């Protein structure tokens, strides 16, 4: 039966490859990397158009392990290194409620939900048994529980396009309110361009010619106390937009008064393969470096079709909170590999497969082959079937050094079957210098884990011009389909010429907006506009494809900005000169 299902030639090939891989595989690389979106077994949601979802993440370091919680999962994960995650299915937690708060209070791990379910605690999250302390009054949404160094406990909450975020002091033992909620943060779209709803912060839905107005959602509270300053972080303008990001207010007390920080949004990723960096958590790793885990958006099959993203973060000497999303969905060094990760957390492996010529065994109508190489997670290629004979091949147009590959499976036609983590993609990836002689470089024909964004760092770089991925087994009765087949390394050619002529035009009538334009440069595949509130603080960015200008609508009024434009190709990056406006 097994032979007749996948075909005898394919089976023999798989067995042959397995034997070779087991005897010739080199030692794993000493320096490890990862790539966003994180390769986690995101839970399939029960809907008419089945989609995966995880969002609103929180990571807590507790008893020397990292604990990761996210909305709409059947449990939570733990890890020793932020790379390898293991799943726990708990008892006693209301997992169907969005955006729980996870924090350590009184030396216990505490799980606080919105709605009326209240707070749950455990001192053994590995065992998965939680105790409900109490219920909580209705009307709590997107809670964030914070215990100060004096032992007092506060609840920050709110999720609305009408009402503000607020705080409430809680009894540290019962978690019941002490006093009434106090408003803290209101949306201020007149001054904060990034809070304006829409894909381009224009206050309307993308391509909505009727100019239908939409109001922003302000939500996702999170608090850090750093150097005796309180950082109240919040998300806007909406989880379905690529402009979903995090701003921050700071105060000298946990009750305020809170002051808006003009460098907001401090976590922002409106462009690239996957956009969005909102409703997040800022935490310290075991090396005492900050990281920021955030929500990225797909939002095609459903508004809440989302993924998790992990970025380096830091607090500068002057107190500015920073998250580095520059090429934030390219390979990055894993935690503890780079001690000053904000100064550079990239192995400098560039994307080799962008818009490269490609062929496939088949293509379903409306799901073109080019979609797998367009650097856009909202489009995908799909084969006509989910059979083992389906394949996808890319021509890098010259021999390149390949260091890593990320295969983002699109689940076209999948239906829910089995529990979380049981949806397994089995495949092989081959490489060739001439398109005739092929060598297997990734053998996942016997893979046993659910890996929807399967990132493979090769044990040793390979030189290749062609790469081909072949299906062995696709889960959920789905068609062999891929958002993007992303190949990283170096084209070993010339860097693009530097961008010399940059013109920044700030809108005189609306300071939230500016136009940035520049002259095209030789050898550039695309450009990255960087900007910030000082020449050495250009931490916000937009990637620009197939254009030499961009309208930026995410600025703050009354704030001076500095801009530059970097040129990027498959060999590397050439930094641009800084312009003030």
Image: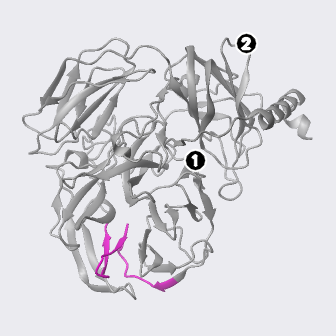
Q: Residues within 10 Å of mark 1 (few under 14, many from 20)?
A: few
Residue denoted by label 1: 49
Residue located 53% across and 79% down the image: 122
What are the residue bounds of the magenta stretch?
132-158
Task: Indicate which disc, 2 or 1, sits on the residue closer to the N terminus.
Answer: 1
Q: Is residue 160 above or below residue 496?
A: below
Residue 224 or 94: which is nearer the viewer? 224
Q: Secondary structure at mark 1?
A: loop
Are dots 2 and 1 in contact, CB under 8 Å?
Answer: no
Residue 108 or 373: which is nearer the viewer? 108
Q: Is residue 370 above or below residue 213?
A: above
Residue 540 or 64: which is nearer the viewer? 64
**Residue 29 horizontal side relative to residue 315, left or right:** right
Q: Residues within 10 Å of mark 2 (few under 14, many from 20)?
A: few
390 in magenta:
no
Residue 307 or 500: which is nearer the viewer? 500
Number of callouts: 2
* Quadrant of the snapshot with the C terminus: top left
Q: Position of residue 198 (x, y in %)?
A: 30, 43
**Mark drawn on residue 436:** 2
Choose mark 2 or mark 1, whichever is in front. Answer: 2
Q: Position of residue 321 (x, y in %)?
A: 26, 53
136 in magenta:
yes
Residue 390 in view, yes or no: yes
Q: Position of residue 280 (x, y in %)?
A: 38, 56
């Amino acid at each position: 039966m097994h032979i007749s299902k996948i075909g005898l030639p394919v089976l023999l090939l798989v067995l042959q490859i397995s034997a070779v891989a087991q005897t010739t595989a080199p030692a794993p690389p000493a320096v490890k990397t990862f790539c966003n979106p994180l390769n986690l077994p995101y839970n399939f949601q029960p809907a008419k158009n089945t989609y995966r979802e995880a969002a609103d993440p929180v990571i807590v370091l507790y008893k020397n392990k990292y604990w990761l919680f996210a909305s709409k999962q059947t449990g939570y994960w733990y890890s020793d290194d932020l790379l390898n995650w293991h799943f726990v299915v708990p008892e006693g937690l209301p997992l169907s409620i969005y955006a729980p708060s996870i924090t350590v209070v009184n030396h216990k791990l505490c799980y606080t939900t919105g709605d009326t379910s209240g707070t749950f605690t455990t001192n053994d999250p590995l065992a998965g048994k939680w105790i409900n302390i109490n219920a909580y009054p209705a009307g709590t949404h997107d809670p964030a529980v914070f215990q100060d160094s004096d032992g007092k406990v506060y609840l920050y909450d709110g999720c609305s396009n009408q009402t503000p975020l607020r705080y409430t002091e809680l009894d540290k033992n019962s978690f019941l309110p002490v006093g009434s909620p106090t408003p803290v943060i209101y949306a201020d779209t007149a001054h904060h361009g990034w809070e304006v709803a829409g894909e381009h912060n224009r206050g309307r839905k993308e391509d909505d010619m009727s100019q239908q107005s939409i109001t922003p959602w302000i939500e996702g509270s999170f608090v850090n106390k750093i150097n005796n300053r309180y950082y109240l972080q919040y998300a806007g303008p909406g989880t379905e937009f690529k402009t979903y990001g995090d701003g921050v207010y700071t105060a000298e007390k946990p009750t305020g008064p809170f002051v808006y920080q003009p460098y907001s949004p401090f976590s922002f990723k409106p462009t690239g393969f996957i956009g969005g960096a909102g409703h997040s958590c800022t935490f310290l790793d075991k090396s005492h470096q900050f990281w920021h885990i955030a929500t990225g958006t797909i939002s095609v099959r459903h508004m809440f079709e989302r993924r998790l993203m992990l970025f380096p973060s830091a607090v500068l000497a002057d107190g500015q909170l920073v998250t580095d999303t520059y090429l934030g969905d390219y390979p990055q060094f894993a935690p503890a590999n780079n001690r000053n990760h904000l100064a550079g957390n990239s192995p400098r492996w560039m994307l080799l497969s962008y818009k490269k010529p490609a062929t496939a065994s088949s293509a379903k109508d409306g799901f073109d082959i080019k979609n797998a190489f367009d650097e856009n997670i909202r489009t995908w290629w799909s084969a006509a079937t989910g059979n083992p004979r389906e394949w996808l091949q890319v021509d890098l147009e010259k021999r390149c050094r390949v260091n890593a590959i990320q295969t983002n499976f699109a689940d076209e036609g999948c239906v829910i079957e089995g529990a979380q983590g049981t949806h397994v993609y089995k495949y092989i990836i081959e490489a060739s210098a001439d398109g005739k002689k092929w060598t297997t470089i990734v053998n996942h024909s016997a893979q046993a884990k659910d890996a929807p964004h399967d990132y493979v760092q090769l044990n040793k770089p390979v030189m290749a011009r062609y790469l081909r991925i072949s299906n062995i087994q696709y889960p959920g009765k789905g068609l062999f389909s891929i958002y993007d087949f992303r190949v990283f390394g170096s084209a070993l050619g010339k860097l693009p010429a530097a961008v010399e002529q940059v013109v920044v035009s700030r809108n005189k009538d609306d300071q939230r907006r500016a136009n940035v334009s520049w002259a095209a440069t030789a050898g550039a595949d695309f450009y990255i506009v960087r900007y910030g509130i000082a020449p050495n603080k250009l931490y916000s960015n937009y990637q620009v494809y197939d254009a030499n200008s961009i309208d930026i609508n995410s600025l703050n009024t009354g704030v001076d900005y500095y801009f530059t434009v970097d040129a990027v190709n498959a060999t590397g990056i050439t930094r641009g000169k800084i312009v003030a406006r």
